[in-house]
Every structure is written in C-alpha cells, then in structure tokens.
Image (spheres, helix red, strand yellow):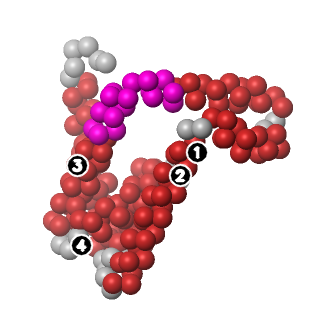
Amino acid sequence: LPAGITNTIFVSLVAFFAIFVVVILVMLNKSLVRIVIRPFFNFFAPEKFKASLKEGFNDFYEAVFSYSVHKKVSFSAGLLTAISWLIVFGQFYLLAIALSINISFASFILVLPIILLVEALPISFGGLGAREAAAILMLSFLGVGAAAATSFSLTVLLFNIIQAAIGFLLFNSMKKPI
C-alpha cells in the first residue's frame, strides 16, 4: 500500500480505538449515561415499556459493577479473550496465506474484525453474501482481487462449518452435557 493510505488507515484505527475507550469510560459512569440517554428515553420509549427498560438499565449496571469487584478474574477473562482472538486471527491469516493472499499480518488484523462483524449481522444465513461483500471491499483496500477475497471468505465459511461440526460431535459424545 502507498504510505499515505497506510497512514490514513493507521490514524483512523487509532482514532477509532480512542473513541471506543472514551465511550467505554463514559458507559461506566451510570449517572452520566442516565443524563445522556434520558431525553431519548423520554421521547422514544413507549409508556408501557418504561418500567421494564428502567429495570433493565439498572440490572445492566449491577452486572457491570459486580465484575469490577473481581478485578483479577475480569483481567484474566479479558486476557484469555485477547489470546483467543489472536489465535482466530492467526488461523485465518494462515488460510489467507494458503490461498496466496500475500498481505501483512498487521494489515490483516485491521480488516478481519470488520469482515467478521458483517458476518455476524443477522441479514443472511451464516453471513453468506454479506461476508463475501465485506471481504471483497475490505481486502480490495489491501490490493487483493475480488476472486481471491471471495475464495478466502468461502474458505472461512467452510472452516467455521468444520469447527462447528467438531464441536457438535464432541458435545454429543459427552456423558453428561453441560
């Protein structure tokens, strides 16, 4: 990629991460969130749902703050989550290399979350079509052709199906299901 595009992508990601951190910090302040969403709540929430929405809001913050008491467990869970995502990125990167898609791991880490997010949207069965479109779009920024991006996306689908089948078989072979 040209240096200008790489710098733009990097600056965009840093800005996105900074905004994400600010939003998380704001979300942790219950009274601030209450002030921000109160006008929307009063305008958009139907009267018959207001009580249950208030209860859900309070339950959400009780759950969030119950985790803050167990900082060690929360940190361990966050660390394990980060490690598991690195493994996912690594296995999909190896799939891309196997398909002769030659991009850097850092660039791959930038586009894969967007592809996986689009795949998770409930707009098609198993993300079929949406994932391919996202892969073509995002990987085109890295100089990957539409055919290679589609091949990668369908291989990811196949990989997900195989993993799900293995999990299904293992779960069904258990004496006492969880």
SS class of the residue under badge 1? helix
Q: Amino acid at mark 4?
A: Ile
Q: Which residue is mark 1?
A: 26
**Mark sitting on residue 103:** 4
Q: Which residues are magenta?
A: 64-80
Q: Which residue is mark 3?
A: 87
The answer for how far apart the CA atoms under marks 2 and 4 are is 31 Å
Q: Mark 4 or mark 1, which has the lower sequence index?
A: 1
The answer for how far apart the CA atoms under marks 4 and 1 are is 36 Å
Q: Mark 3 or mark 1, which has the lower sequence index?
A: 1
Cβ atoms under marks 2 and 3 closer than 8 Å: no
The answer for how far apart the CA atoms under marks 4 and 3 are is 17 Å
Q: Which quarter of the rendering shows the N terminus?
A: bottom left
Q: Is residue 79 magenta?
A: yes
Q: Which residue is mark 2?
A: 22
Query: Quick one: label 1, few (<14), some, or many (20+) residues within 10 Å?
Result: some
Query: Quick one: label 2, few (<14), some, or many (20+) residues within 10 Å?
Result: few
Q: Taking 141 as reference, is 49 above or below it?
A: above
Q: Amino acid at mark 1?
A: Val
Residue 133 is left or right of residue 60, and the answer is left
Residue 68 percent location from the top left of the image: 45, 28
The answer for how far apart the CA atoms under marks 3 and 1 are is 30 Å
